[in-house]
Every structure is written in structure tokens, then in C-alpha cells.
Image: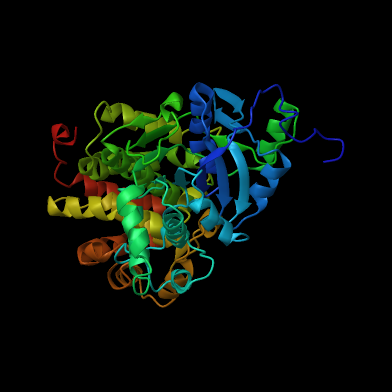
């Protein structure tokens, strides 16, 4: 960067006053863009209002890029809040250290055992919980889980938590809160179950002390997080440098909207996150389903249909009339009836807000990013609404279209070319699904192999062959006639379905 702006540091912060936190009280696993534009921002607001020992030790899973950038900048970075109407910068400045778990796995366990750490937060994505596709339980057949159970420095998130809690229990058992911030229904309860499954799989009485400690002094509250945070680009780094007069290699883009709903069940205190707008509520389950289904489920539909239509950005995808119609239909007819809104949330206002957020043309949110890891994301989003709709005598044609779009993107049938954005979608299941697609006779054959035989979306949905049939039909329509024809086919079929339950029932 010779001749360019100097690097962002605490001594040179572009006019921002960024005091360093006194001591850490939070360990965060998953030092990606989302954490730095969400939980870190709320923590900065809490520290500004009330102070306290709530600095954050950030742990990246494998990549050194963010850790190296943060260390070179005194652990500072900017959050660029972007919309067509604004571009503003803030510096959270809450991190006290950062390291890479893959490089220092023993340190993760040591930090978990440190009594100064009172909260562990997680943003490791749905894929980071090492669950088996068919059951949702801890995948004991996963070689990484098996290695963690065998001993040595743990490499999986659940293994790290379990081994850290073991050491913490043996070292005095200071109270601790483990707070999942990932898109899993009942994520606190799920995390607790997975940790207990890991401990329960250890030989003999090895886990006895740790299990008793969990019962006595560890809390696993649930939470719902919401903010659209795209990947950082070189163009954004250059823009921030021009505005700030300093080079920030760790800058993060984010939309203006942000939401955090948290179950107020902490074992050893917490920051005043409400200073940043967090809501403490006993309706986290409703916030979770509202977000995972109405926002995330529809977001997936937009991403797959957009990518198949040749669109690289979410905003351009939802600007297409046929995709907007499909998105509104899946919310109103298929996801909406499966959601009970939290007190004070107006459904029509929330839907309008969603389309405004998706239409944020300045944000640059890519269809490939939203469509990545669909094998895990869709497993959290689609089975419940599908089973409910079928049980009420309605067929979820638009959700079937979403699954068809997903398979067309990551496991295209021979002779079908889904386009560059689809090819850019990373998915741990892609190789296996591609093998199934390579020998499939048609879309229905592929859908049955994936949904019924492989049980990619769970055992309950695997039992509904009629759903797999419909997904297969729509795959063939995409392949033979194009995605626009498949959208129209799904919308026409949805128009012919009986009306959804009355809005009063959905609140």
C-alpha cells in the first residue's frame, strides 16, 4: 500500500474515539463478518452505556485473513452501513484479542475454562453444529466428531464446547452462559442437547463431573439474530479508505436494519445489549420462526431463482416481477400460516420491510452467498411448513420450487447448465448430490434419491413422496423450459390451492 492511506489503528482512527475494553468477558466462536457487524456492535453500545468487563476474544475457525487484519489494526475495524440513502461508518472496538482455532485448538479449550469468560457466543452457521442430516442429532459418524471424542485438541465447535466445559468443571466450575446466534430453531436448547450428546458418548464416567456442572451452573439461552451482512469486497475497502482517510482491511458491510431477540437467562451476568436495541423476551421461539421462515426461507427462494435467471445480486433478483411474485406467494400462502408472530410485530409491515431490505441495491448481496450451504440451511427452514401445509390440505408448491431451484443449482442434471452464480454456491453436500444427479433419469428420480432415500431434509419429509414428486416435476420444468416457466407453473398451481388459514390464527 505504498503511497496510499495509512492503516487504521487506535492511534489513528479517523476522528473516532475508540477506547479499548478493560478486560474480556466474552469468547466468540466464529469471527466472520456477521459477528463483527452484529453482536460486536451491540456490545459496543452496551460498553458505551454501562461499561463493564465485556471485551470480546474472537476466534476464527480456520481462516487467518480476518485475524491477521485485526491484529495489524489494534483489533479495530469499521462497519459500513449501506443503503441507497446512506453510507455511514462506525468502529465497534470491542475485541481484546483474536486467534485461529485451527492453529491453537488447545487455546479454545483454555479460554472456555477461564473463569473471566462469562459468556460464549457462537456464529458458526448451521453447518457448524455437526448434526446428522436425517435426525438432527450429533453426527457420531463424522470423522471430526469421532476424533474429538477420542481425545486430543478438539476441532469441532461442539467438541470445543464440551471439552472446555469439562475443564471448566474440573477447575472450580465458574458459571457460564453459552449463547448460540445461529439460524437454528430453539438454538439454545439444540446447543445444550448436542453438548450433552457429546459428553454422553464419552467412555465410562469421564463426563460425570461436566454433566453435573451443566445442570448446576451453565445456561443455554436461545436468541434470534437478524442483519444482512454481505461479503467484503476490494471495492468497499477502497471506498472506506477514501472516506476515512485510512486503510481498513477488515471493514464489514451491513444493511441499516438490525434485530436481536434474546432469552434473558444468563448464568453470570450479561452486557446491557438493550442499549443497542436488543430485545429480551420470552417469545424468542416466535422471533426465530419468523426470521428462519419468512426471511431466510424466502431469501433462499430468491437466491436460487435469481441465480438460475442469471442474476448475481439479490436486489436484481427480487426486482424481477416473476421472482417477486413467487416470494410474496411463498410468504403469504406457505410460510406465513406456519408462523405465530411475536407480540407487537405487524405481519404486513414486516413483509413490506423484508422486500425493502432485499431490494437494497447499494448493498451488493450476492445470490451465491445466500444460496451457499443450502443442504443445511433448507433443513432448518422447509420441513415444518411443508408438513403443516400438507396436513391442512394445502400443497406448498413454492417451497417445492425452492428445493427444485436448489437442486438445479448445486446438482444439475446432465446437459443442464445453471450458470456461474449457481456454480459459485459452496455446499458440503454438492459432490454427493452431483453423483446422484449424474446417473438420475430425470428430475423426479433425482428428487426421490435426495429427499426420500438420502433424507437430506430429514426423515419426516422423506416420508412425503408427494412432495418429492412435485420437486422433481419442477426440476424437469426448469431443465426443459427454463426457470421462468417453473415459477409460473408453481404460481398457477398455488393459485388453485385452498386459501391459507385466516390471518387471525396467524396473528
Left or right: residue 446 versus residue 66 is left
Give x and y (percent) for residue 319.
45, 37
On the rendered structure, is 111 left or right of 277? Answer: right
Residue at image x 30%, y 67%?
Answer: 134
Residue 26 vs 478, above or below: the answer is above
| Residue placed most toward the observer, 455 or 410 | 455
Please determine whether, in this image, residue 121 is positioned above or below residue 425: above
Outermost front residue: 172
Q: Residue at x 34, y 67 (%)?
A: 443
Can the viewer see residue 309? no
Residue 434 image offset from top left, x and y in percent: 46, 71
Q: Where is residue 438 in the image (x, y as percent from the top left)?
A: 44, 75
**278 shown above or below 99:** above
How many badges with numbers are in the image? 0
- Kindly give the residue lying farthest to the right in the view shown: 3
Q: Residue furthest bottom?
A: 439
- Vertical position of residue 66 compared to residue 210: above or below: above
- Quick one: quadrant of the C terminus? top left
Q: For residue 490, say whether it is visible.
A: yes
Q: Where is residue 258 in the image (x, y as percent from the top left)?
A: 44, 31
Front residue (pair 217, 146): 217
Quadrant for residue 463, please give it: bottom left
Amino acid at each position: 500500500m505504498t503511497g496510499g492511506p495509512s492503516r487504521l489503528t487506535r492511534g489513528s482512527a479517523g476522528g473516532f474515539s475508540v477506547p479499548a475494553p478493560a478486560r474480556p468477558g466474552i469468547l466468540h466462536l466464529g469471527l466472520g463478518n456477521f459477528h463483527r457487524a452484529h453482536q460486536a456492535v451491540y456490545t459496543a453500545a452496551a460498553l458505551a452505556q454501562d461499561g463493564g468487563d465485556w471485551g470480546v476474544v474472537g476466534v476464527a475457525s480456520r481462516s487467518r485473513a480476518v485475524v491477521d487484519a485485526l491484529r495489524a489494526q489494534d483489533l479495530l475495524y469499521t462497519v459500513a452501513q449501506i443503503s441507497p440513502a446512506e453510507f455511514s461508518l462506525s468502529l465497534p472496538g470491542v475485541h481484546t484479542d483474536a486467534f485461529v482455532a485451527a492453529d491453537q485448538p488447545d487455546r479454545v479449550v483454555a479460554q472456555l475454562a477461564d473463569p473471566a469468560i462469562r459468556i460464549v457466543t457462537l456464529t458458526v452457521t448451521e453447518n457448524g453444529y455437526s448434526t446428522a442430516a436425517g435426525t438432527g442429532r450429533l453426527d457420531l459418524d463424522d470423522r471430526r466428531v469421532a476424533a474429538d471424542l477420542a481425545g486430543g485438541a478438539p476441532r469441532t465447535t461442539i467438541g470445543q464446547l464440551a471439552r472446555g466445559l469439562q475443564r471448566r468443571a474440573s477447575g472450580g466450575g465458574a458459571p457460564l452462559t453459552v449463547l448460540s446466534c445461529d439460524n437454528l430453531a430453539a438454538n439454545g436448547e439444540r446447543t445444550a442437547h448436542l453438548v450433552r450428546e457429546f459428553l454422553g458418548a464419552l467412555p465410562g464416567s469421564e463426563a460425570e463431573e461436566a454433566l453435573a456442572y451443566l445442570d448446576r451452573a451453565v445456561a443455554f439461552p436461545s436468541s434470534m439474530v437478524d442483519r444482512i451482512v454481505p461479503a467484503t469486497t476490494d471495492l468497499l475497502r477502497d471506498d472506506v479508505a477514501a472516506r476515512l482517510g485510512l486503510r481498513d482491511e477488515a471493514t464489514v458491510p451491513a444493511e441499516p436494519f438490525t434485530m436481536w431477540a434474546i432469552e434473558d437467562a444468563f448464568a453470570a451476568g450479561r452486557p446491557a445489549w438493550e442499549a443497542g436495541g436488543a430485545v429480551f423476551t420470552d417469545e424468542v421461539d416466535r422471533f426465530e420462526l419468523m426470521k428462519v421462515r419468512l426471511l431466510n426461507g424466502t431469501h433462499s427462494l430468491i437466491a436460487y431463482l435469481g441465480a438460475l435467471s442469471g442474476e448475481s445480486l439479490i436486489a436484481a433478483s427480487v426486482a424481477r416481477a416473476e421472482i417477486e411474485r413467487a416470494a410474496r406467494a411463498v410468504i403469504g400462502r406457505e410460510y406465513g400460516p406456519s408462523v405465530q408472530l411475536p407480540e407487537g410485530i405487524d405481519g404486513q409491515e414486516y413483509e413490506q420491510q423484508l422486500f425493502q431490505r432485499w431490494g437494497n441495491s447499494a448493498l451488493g448481496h450476492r445470490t451465491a452467498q445466500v444460496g451457499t450451504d443450502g443442504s443445511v440451511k433448507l433443513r432448518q427452514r422447509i420441513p415444518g411448513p411443508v408438513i403443516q401445509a400438507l396436513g391442512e390440505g394445502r400443497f406448498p408448491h413454492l417451497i417445492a420450487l425452492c428445493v427444485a431451484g436448489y437442486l438445479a443449482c448445486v446438482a444439475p442434471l446432465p446437459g443442464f447448465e445453471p450458470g456461474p452464480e449457481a456454480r459459485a454456491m459452496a455446499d458440503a453436500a454438492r459432490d454427493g448430490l452431483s453423483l446422484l444427479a449424474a446417473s438420475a433419469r430425470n428430475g423426479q428420480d433425482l428428487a426421490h434419491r435426495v429427499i426420500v432415500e438420502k433424507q437430506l431434509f430429514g426423515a419426516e419429509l422423506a416420508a412425503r413422496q408427494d412432495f418429492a414428486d412435485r420437486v422433481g416435476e419442477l426440476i424437469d420444468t426448469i431443465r426443459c423450459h427454463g426457470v421462468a416457466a417453473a415459477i409460473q407453473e408453481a404460481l398457477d398451481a398455488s393459485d388453485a390451492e385452498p386459501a391459507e388459514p385466516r390471518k387471525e390464527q396467524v396473528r
